[in-house]
Amino acid sequence: MGAKAAVSRAVLIAQMTDIHVGFAPDEAGEELNLVRLRAALARLADGPNRPDFLVLSGDLTENGDAASFAKLGTLLADLPCPILPMVGNHDSRATFLAAFPQVEAAADGFAHYVVDAPLGLRIICLDTLEDGRHGGAFCESRAAWLAARLAEAPDTPTLIFMHHPPVVAGIDWMDPAPGEPWITRLAAVLEGQRQVQAIHCGHLHRTISTRFAGIPLGITPAIAPLVAMDLSPIDPDTPDARELIVAEPPSYALHRWDGENLVTHYEQVGDWAVLARFHAGLQPMVAGMFAERD
Ligand SMILES: [Fe+2]
Ligand SMILES: [Fe+2]
């Protein structure tokens, strides 16, 4: 080995989002989204990247029903790490709280909470659900709660998860309007909060990277099928046969915190061909890369 160790121990936070259990069975009668979730969980369990936490960032079910939450719970039962579940617009908060008793609703009734992770990282999970609304919500009560959480640890590196991205991404039919009040309210809370390392969301079913209130913001693609990659404007009154949902593979994020830096990786789950392995033939190449480190 060269002058520096390859990788020191870091905290790994997996994020799976938009599972949509209960959306539709496939032709064999097996629910497609459960098949996709099972593949993603197997990749985590059997692969080299065992997470310390698994964040489930909302739209865990399609219709918010207890039966779908129960199916989800069955698949998650053997997971060897803590789960941080969150609500999305397809979920019902009351049913969600009944399904995940480890989440205690805050005094204001919302399913938002804080978790202290190793290596000095604080995780804040927000609740952006407003019943009956597709888009996000962030009311005065939630703004006050987040402001208080940030104020109590202003020097602690903090990672925020929320279901709805507070940004216009360019996928017209999924986007909020620019300057929606809930977005302005959230931005006002986050402005100048330098301890916030990043915000990671779901909802858009695509991999997207941007900034919000000066903070890096990522959107993790879905376990369920993805939203089509189409950035052209849409006329909601004129069906134009564009692609809306496509069967791209399920994906998840792995957020790696080493005590100083937060780095996010995304993996598409699939049975990919392995084109090179670390066998003796490639050992000189790998060793050479180590040797040039200083
Ligand atoms: Fe979704
Ligand atoms: Fe959503």
Image (tube, grey):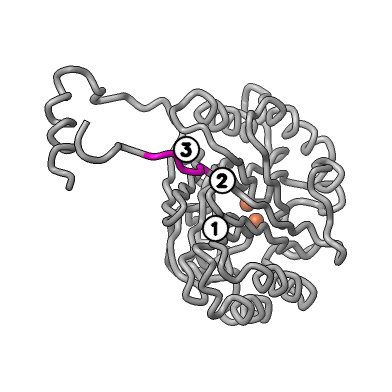
Residue sitting nearer the eye, 177 or 129? 129
Mark 3: few/some/many CA within 10 Å (<14, 14-19, 20+) = some
Q: CB atoms at circles 3 and 1 under 8 Å apart?
A: no
Judged from the image, the secondary structure of the residue bearing numbered disc 1 is strand
Mark 3 beta carbon near ligand 1 (under 8 Å):
no
Res. 79 mark: none
Q: CB atoms at circles 2 and 1 under 8 Å apart?
A: yes
Q: Is residue 237 visible?
A: no
- Magenta-drawn stretch, dominant element (helix, strand or loop): loop
Residue 156 location, quadrant: bottom right
Which is nearer the N-term, disc 3 or disc 2?
A: 2
Q: CA distance from mark 2 to mark 1?
A: 9 Å
The percent position of residue 143, horizontal first and vertical second, equals 72, 75
9 falls in the magenta region: yes
Q: CA distance from mark 3 to mark 2?
A: 15 Å
Q: Amino acid at mark 1?
A: His
Location of the N terminus by quadrant is top left
Q: Is residue 242 visible?
A: yes
Q: Which residue is mark 1?
A: 200
Q: Is residue 245 above or below residue 25?
A: below
The percent position of residue 27, horizontal first and vertical second, equals 62, 26
Q: Which residue is mark 2?
A: 15
Q: Which residue is mark 3?
A: 249
The residue stretch that appears in magenta = 8-12
